[in-house]
Amino acid sequence: MTNHHKAIALLAVAGAVAAGIASVSAHHSTTMFDHSTTMTINGEVVELRWVNPHVSLSVNGVVKERAEEGAMTWVMEMTSPGNLVRAGGWRRDAVKPGEQVEVLFSPLRDAERKGGALKKLTVIATGEVFTANIRQQERPGLE
Amino acid sequence: MRSRVLAAMLLALVSTAAADAQNASKKPPTIINPPPTAQDYADLAKLPDWSGVWNPNITDQDRQARSNPPPWNEKVAKEVEKMWAEEKAGRPKLIFYGCFPEAHPTWMLVTHNAMEILFTPGRVTMLGESDGNRLRRIYTDGRPHPETPDPTFHGHSIGHWEGNTLVVDTVHILPQAPLAISEAVGVPNDGDMHVLERIHLADKDVLHVDLEITAPNILTKPWNTTRIFFRQRARKFDIVEGVCQQGDYREAKDENGHHIFVPIEKTEWGNVVAPK
């Protein structure tokens, strides 16, 4: 195999790995979260990914119920942007990186993973509250 | 000599033209979609008002998943029970892998997002949110289904009005398209699925989609269910573009400073992985 061919083969493997990551697609059920449990994290917003089908919010901070772990980055998932606007009063700029927040969430059942389903977000500086319950839209003529 | 060559060329041209004419007479006539008339547009005003945005009754979807399950055949029923167990254990099956469309009729059955319904002469169009590819074209111009199937995620739909009810007949759905009753419980329809719908207003702002689903390779008999949608007129309910695959990427910049998307790491269930 020439160096040129080796480079192509490596690229193909890299492409397959990238494709493998992307192919586990975003459109999923939410039962991997333990909806019977609510935890609280206080910390700083790292990133708000305002994308379909699940918006995600990364927060670096301490989870009250797992304080012994110290500050870590957790990823909170939600419904789609459209549903968040309608059901939870969200905006694309509802929170920005660096802002202090408190998030109530249901954690992934797999405790090794730092992930959760966001239930309620409070922006500390403004006191603004955002929720993520899509079932709040289940009647006609909402305002 | 020159005149003989010209005569030969002329003869060849005439022969070709005659052959073309003969072939043309054998060709089926081209079917065109005629331009709508002013009357066609005026007639749309006589249809019921389905304007606005329709969002689903998800609580009722969840209720029916248990209270009105499809009549799965014996083999599929066992698979479905396993899926329920896995979902309960927090390992939900990723039915909508690859960000493929929920497809028909599963879009109607389990969607969590809104849709809008447009009337134009000869057609009803349903546009959904979140997948970026939730789109149903229902032909109401009297055409039949095509004789040769060309299966798609949403199949081939023809419809007609019975009073204020739109009756829709859909065939030619891809065998891979799932028949699902939740985002984690469902199986591929495996072919030959036929969906009949009666879509109508059950109340001023409540739309009912009555479905009869025949899927001989996974069900023992036709399955009937009604799905409920609520009308919203507040502008914040306007449908927004939603591209499912975007969720698998994050925004970044390449070496030239251009805005691009790069893949992010996901768990086997599609969750975003937190940075270490």
Image (cartoon, helix red, strand yellow):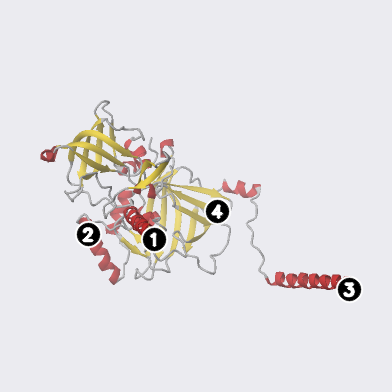
Cα–Cα gap, marks 3 and 2? 89 Å
Q: Position of residue B65 (x, y in %)?
A: 29, 57
Q: Contact (CB < 8 A) between labels 3 and 1?
A: no
Say what secondary structure mark 1 lies in.
Answer: helix
Query: Which tag is nearer the camera, tag 4 or tag 1?
Result: 1
The subunit carrying tag 2 is: B
Residue at the spot of label 1: A5
Q: Residue B215 appears at what percent x and percent y?
A: 39, 67
Please tell me whether mark 3 or mark 2 is closer to you in this view.
Answer: 3
Q: Provide the chain ID for the residue under circle 1.
A: A
Q: Residue at x 28, y 51 (%)?
A: B266
Residue assigned mark 3: B1
Report the amino acid beneath label 3.
Answer: Met
Do discs 1 and 2 belong to a common subunit? no
In this picture, residue B30 sits left or right of residue A98:
right
- In the rendered image, residue A37, in percent from the top left (x then y), is placed at 17, 45
| Residue type pointed to by label 2 | Glu
Task: Measure how far apart labels 1 and 2 are at the Cα level.
Answer: 44 Å
Q: Amino acid at mark 1?
A: His
The disc label shown at residue B86, or none: 2
What's the mark number on residue B123? Answer: 4
B129 relative to B93, above or below = above
Secondary structure at numbered mark 4: strand
Q: Which secondary structure lies at badge 3?
A: loop
The disc, 3 or 2, on the residue closer to the chain's N-terminal end is 3
